[in-house]
Image (cartoon, helix red, strand yellow):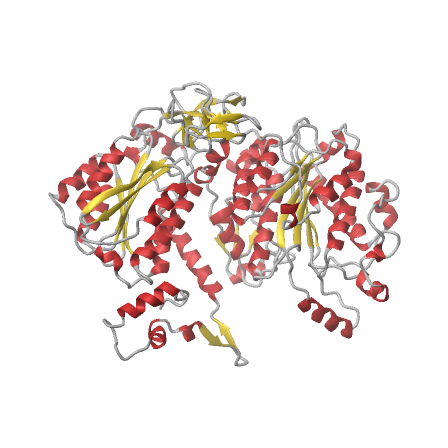
Amino acid sequence: MLKEGAIESRLVAGPLVVTTWPRSFLLPPHSRGKLLRDFNQSTVVVGHGYASFQANRRSLISFSDDVSLLVVLIDTNPFFWSTSSSSLNFHQFVSHVLVFLDLIVRLSQLNQIVVIATGHNTCDYIYDSSLDTDQVTGEGELPALYSFVLQRLEEFVDKDEKLGAKQEGLSEKRASSLLSGSLSMALCYIQRVFRSGPLHPQPRILCLQGSPDGSEQYVSIMNAIFSAQRSMVPIDCCYVGSHNSAFLQQASYITGGVYVKPQHLEGLYQYLATVFAVDLHSRSFLQLPRPAGVDFRASCFCHKTTIDMGYVCSVCLSIFCKHHDKCSTCGLVFGKVQSDAASDRKRKVPES
Amino acid sequence: MNNSEKKRMNGEAEEENEEDVEDEGRDAWERTYTDERSWEALEEDESGLLQPIDNKAIYHSQYRRRLQSLSATSAASRIQKGLIRFLCVVVDLSKAAGEMDFKPSRMAVIAKHVEAFIREFFDQNPLSQIGLVIIKDGVAQSLTELGGSPEAHIKALMVKLGCAGDSSLQNALELVHDTLHKIPSYGHREVLILYSALSTCDPGDIMETIQKCKKAKLRCSVIGLSAEMFVCKHLCQETGGSYMVALDEGHFKELLLEHAPPPPALAEFAIANLIKMGFPQRAAEGSIAICSCHREAKVGEGYICPRCKARVCELPTECRFCGLTLVSSPHLARSYHHLFPIEPFTEISARQFELSRVASKTCFSCRESLLTPGAACTKCKQYFCLDCDIYIHESLHNCPGCESRRITPAAASATKS
């Protein structure tokens, strides 16, 4: 049983602003009570007869073009949310996102949602619409989905905080979240869906990020992006932070997704519903926001400035802006045969 | 028995031509049963229902064995790999390539898999270049120049598919040597020969040519389609390449794709050089310029060389006017996983799995419940299912467990010391 008062006071200030159409819109009146608890693809049954009815019904419903599996990566990085000067704070952000998730679930009975939280010290699954254990009967004012997700988010934020308590001396200015971890988990989940058989919804990833890019994650994020490109999974991004994220712009460009940095964050739900609720098949008919220009220039390893022309080490591919004699990353001397230098390097490896 | 291949229309047509050579008494439908026993792909389960053979277990054990052999050779230390490769693919189109032991013919199978190989090669080595050479009528011809665009090579190969005459290994090696001799020293020179014939008709002494190639640091590998030949084996041993003979079509594809990731660089060949490269920006929307590759006026999308301001259509490429190599940062990033590989996961025995204190036995990345013991990462100690293990090591190159932890500098030095 949920203690709704406790959750609401911490994460949600005031009643949720619901701007979707009334619940009865999609469902015939006589079955409303039963189907409300079961409108996404789950196996929770109320009575044996109903179960067989539902199973038969599912076999009649075929996976049409517009069924999607949406994996949402929510940024819960406390360093960002506590210092963000924009008009959106964390509980308003979560309320916009929850209404959006509800919208996706209602667009089609077969739509699936998975929510993964990206924290500062860890990442974890929050909600999976296809799991039995994630179906909770809703009682009270909030719908089942909202209260379940809010409770799990609260548990996650606590866990994230506990893991971070052991660290000291972290500069708060550029504290990034672990985006590469949640992207990797999302891609593994999508591979599992691909393996499940020929009939599956079309997967895509939506990244709701506000934290700045962490340069230590560059290689992992690029690996994840290329893997997504190979599996043809678009990565969309709605960036709620202050400056544009170069990593996510590249991700959307390379994988064929949409990148949006909303100008008016109070209307976040409107951006989500009009741009990111569109399934992959329908995107060919709609004019979605296109990026103005993605900067693919590299930055040099010595000064971290973006450069037009530079020198690249042929062995380790590090980029330098000026000609050097020795590569600082791999330690090799340029232009000479490496027999002595290589054996020195090999002797150093076991010690360090 | 090759159960997975189904007959194609042209395959059946060629089978009818072969009818005179093989059994006269058999019809085409009877011959398919002698060659492909499709009933062997089924088995009965306990209740008597027919099930296809569980390929998953076989696939997993194959993957495990491959991983063992790879980790044994690499010795878990950083091996320098040739990332900027110049590869010449030599396709033997002599009369032996028309043999039908690979359905529909060796030539068709080679062409299909070389197309897949070229795409995979440019996916894994974006800074490298391929050139195609064919051997026909005892003469070697260069089909395409060394270039970085996959479409040009594939188009050229698909057009010229006819086999005739003898095969000449020496002529091919001479041609390849002349092509690869001129490239700069930071590039790794490789040759991949797809040889179907059982003999070679050479104008001179092939041993001299082999020594010439060895001196020029060409790494020659051969994939044979018929049987093992001494001259190919000698060539590969001398130059440091690998010689394999394909057993069937599936094996051929596997052997071919093994050449796509960069091979370890031999110590004396590894010269580090600083290469000057340009990182062009996209041209402004609506700007009109004549592109240097097609010599046509084009609007908008394209890139501008930072040194000479010429417009190019796609990257990576070399600017035609000033010779600067033009790349974008994702192309360099595609090769990073070769430089920072993740360690293989350790397999968990059944007993360890039961004794583990993990509360819910689910795979960390895909949250599927683990019915059979999977694999665990050595660094973050998380459990993964075997399918995720394969996906992580072959495609993703990131361990989700390690990426989901924040390692502070203090903790990092504590674990290292």
Can see residue B228?
no
Q: From the top left corner, tell me how far across and down residue A289 is, in percent.
A: 66, 37
Residue A163's place in the image compared with A43, above or below, is above
Q: In which quarter of the image is residue B291?
A: top left
Between A286 and A255, the one lying in front of the other is A286
- Identified at 12% across, 44% down, the residue is B203
Can see residue B200?
yes
Residue A338's place in the image compared with B193, above or below, is above
Q: From the top left corner, tell me how far across and down residue A318 is, in percent.
A: 45, 28
Q: From the top left corner, tell me how far across and down residue A149 is, in percent.
A: 76, 49
**Position of B250 compared to A111: left or right?**
left
Q: From the top left corner, tell me how far across and down residue B173 is, in percent.
A: 21, 42
**Position of B129 compared to B380: left or right?**
left
- Identified at 74% across, 44% down, the residue is A273
Q: In which quarter of the image is residue B285?
A: top right
Quadrant of image for the N terminus of chain B: bottom left
Between B80 and B136, the one lying in front of the other is B136
Residue A33's place in the image compared with A146, above or below, is below
- Identified at 18% across, 41% down, the residue is B210
